[in-house]
Amino acid sequence: MGPAQGVLPSLFGTAAAATYAQTKYPIVLVHGLSGTSKYFGVIDYWWQIPSDLRANGATVYVADVAAFNSDEQRGEELLKQISSVLAATGAAKVNLIAHSQGGTTSRYAAAVKPQWIASVTTIGTPHAGTPVADTVAMTPQALKNLLADGTSVLGSLLSLFVGNPQPQDPLAALNGLTTAGAADFNRRYPSAGVPASCSSKSGAASEVRNGNTQLLYSWAGNQAGTNLLDVTDPIMVLGSVIIKTAGGGDNDGLVPVCSARFGRELGVYGWNHLDEVNQLFGLRGLFSADPVVTIRTQANRLKTAGL
């Protein structure tokens, strides 16, 4: 099972009496940039989400790919872990639910091994890049190198805590998240789910790759500062200012709503980028939708679709 050995067995979904989220194929949750399955081996990236899905009958695995690297590298790591899931469960395919860069990482996997992927659901993914990455990319090379060294160490530590060391390349990750880098990725790994433009609103709800049909979904957030108690909100507010100054419009603090559109758009919620995965510790806007319920509902939607 390769690098996935230290990750997947402990994350195997247990049997549950409820069946609301009991999909035909296992669900694999894919984290984004700077992510891991569990921060410091303790705090779930997908806060309270895997346990809720399992309590509602789903078989769930949480992928653990490089915190900082290109979608190609992360995608190859994801494919190894999907292979382990298929071997462990006997399933023919998996459903990918992915956040942020995890969405483009999942698109890579879906393009390379379409026979393994039943559906791709992306949450706050910069399919067209983000002005935040464009801004960071314009900083002097010496500063970028310094930041890259620090984030590379951070990524290595994150993978060390879950016993699944992965190669880190922060500059490759940054380049892929720029608008130019995203355009190049879309050229090399085209998907019918990517809208032709913002005015298109949404892309195709499905696509067929080598005779394999994949259903495509997405949703996004459109708020930056959502909870005064959340210490990460100031970062989101700063990111939102950068995006709006660049003409990116409504956004979640890191990704424009327009860029997050993919496949069948299921909604735009009053969340920032971390609220989308129920972080930090579930802190979000007082009257905003519950991301745990939203993802549970998506599992039921996949179940209803026969996936």
Image: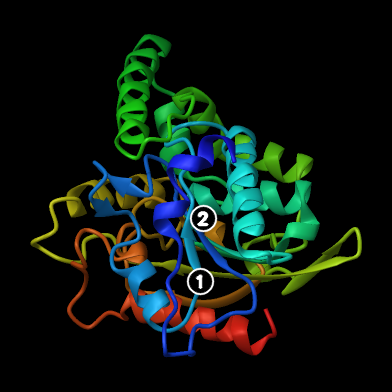
Identity of the amino acid at label 1?
Thr
Q: Do we see residue 127 in this rendering?
A: no
Residue labelled with disc 1: 59
Q: Position of residue 270 (x, y in %)?
A: 33, 73
Mark 2 to mark 1 CA distance (whole Å)? 24 Å
Contact, CB < 8 Å: mark 2 with mark 1? no
- Mark 1 residue crowding within 10 angstroms, few (<14) / some (14–19) / many (20+): many
Checking the image for residue 156, the label placed there is none
Residue 11 versus residue 152 in the image, above or below: below
Residue in the foreground of this view, choosing between 257 and 294: 294
Q: Is residue 263 left or right of residue 258?
A: right
> Please, which residue is most extreme toward the left here?
229
Residue at 69 percent across and 40 percent down: it is 185
Identity of the amino acid at label 2?
Thr
Q: Position of residue 209 (x, y in %)?
A: 85, 59
Q: Do we see residue 58 in this rendering?
A: yes
Residue 303 versus residue 8 in the image, above or below: below
Residue at 18 percent across and 67 percent down: it is 283
Q: Where, by quadrant of the figure, is residue 271 drawn?
A: bottom left
Residue labelled with disc 2: 125
- Mark 2 residue crowding within 10 angstroms, few (<14) / some (14–19) / many (20+): many
Q: Where, by quadrant of the figure, is residue 148 drawn?
A: top left
Name the secondary structure under disc 1. loop
Residue at 27 percent across and 79 percent down: it is 288
Q: Nearer the viewer, mark 2 or mark 1?
A: 1
Q: Is residue 299 left or right of residue 189?
A: left
Name the secondary structure under disc 2. loop
Residue 272 versus residue 107 in the image, above or below: below
Q: Position of residue 129 (x, y in %)?
A: 55, 45
The C terminus: image quadrant: bottom right
